[in-house]
Image: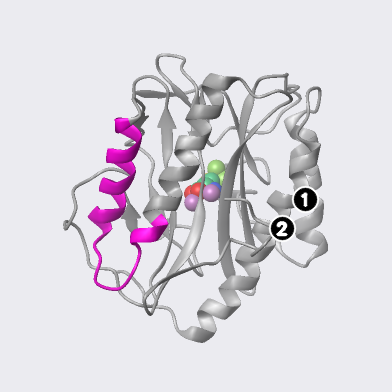
Amino acid sequence: MIQIKTDEDIEMMRESAELAAEVLLMIEPYVKPGVTTNRLNDLCHDLIVSRGAVPSPLGYKGFPKSICSSINNEICHGIPSDRKLRNGDIVNLDITTYLNEFHGDTSKTLHVGSPRPKSSRLVETCREALQKAIEVVRPGAHFGDIGATIQTFTEGRGYSVVREFCGHGIGRSFHEDPQVLHFGRFGEGAELKKGMVFTIEPMINEGKCDLEILSDKWTAVTKDGSRSAQFEHTVAVWDNGCKVLTRLDGKTTF
Ligand code: MF3
Ligand code: CO
Ligand code: CO
């Protein structure tokens, strides 16, 4: 069952979502060669708890850290560690906060040091795919429109779309109905209605879409070792479109 949130719910959610966005803005300048993902995790954790919020990933189904950090060929759910980021790496930082009894979820892929041209094209395509998908969100559209928009655009650029992970309804629970697929056909799937709140979080690979899960039981990596990028926003369906709850106007760059 896809919940319909009230205006009040959505305003409460906005605070949590905006905190997640703020954490992502705060951490960006720390993403430099030599920094460990544990250090990034700790900085994010401290800002979240200083605001009276809770980092949603910590302890979620046994996840051991407060953020997810996924490097290069890692698709998602990477666990922060003492690994140092290196010049030319790409890293997705996925921030989810719990505040006001609601979750907010956003992520971005960043370049470490000097961007490699090939990675820039991958990352930029993923960012644009999310933006194009956000632009189709309005009452009366279908979930299939979101998936088809992402799939046609990214496959047209020669990339593949990950199938095993998807966006999700979000609210008082981290993951709610529906599953928001990043591939599909226009006009298919449930109809979008005002008050639905969900994430869109495409993961796209330079090579094939196949993945493996590492022995840590969390980290998803590309089977062919190719690089993978992801961007995520939490959106609320609204009158003639949607509100992007994880965007801080004039500050957030995606
Ligand atoms: N934030 C991720 C998402 O976008 C979920 C992370 S689950 C965790 O849905 F346990 F790995 F944190
Ligand atoms: Co999510
Ligand atoms: Co997320």
Q: Residue at x 61, y 27 (%)?
A: 90
Question: Under 8 Å from ligand 3: the CB of mark 2?
Answer: no
Q: Is residue 201 left or right of residue 178?
A: right
For mark 2, does the 10 Å Cα neighbourhood hold few (<14), some (14 to 19), or many (20 or more) residues?
many
Quadrant of the frame with the N terminus: bottom left
Q: Is residue 200 visible?
A: yes
Q: Is residue 127 left or right of residue 186?
A: right
Q: Residue at x 30, y 74 (%)?
A: 193
Quadrant in the rendering for residue 78:
top right
| Magenta region, residue range | 134-156
Any mark on residue 22, and which? 2
Which amino acid type is shown beneath numbered disc 1? Met
Residue labelled with disc 1: 26
**Secondary structure state at the residue bearing disc 2:** helix
Q: CA distance from mark 1 to mark 2?
A: 6 Å
Question: Under 8 Å from ligand 3: the CB of mark 1?
Answer: no
Check contact, mark 1 vs mark 2: CB within 8 A.
yes
Mostly what secondary structure, the magenta segment? helix
The percent position of residue 199, horizontal first and vertical second, equals 45, 57
Is residue 59 shown above or below 155?
A: below
Quadrant in the rendering for residue 39:
top right
Any mark on residue 142, and which? none
Q: Is residue 36 left or right of residue 191?
A: right
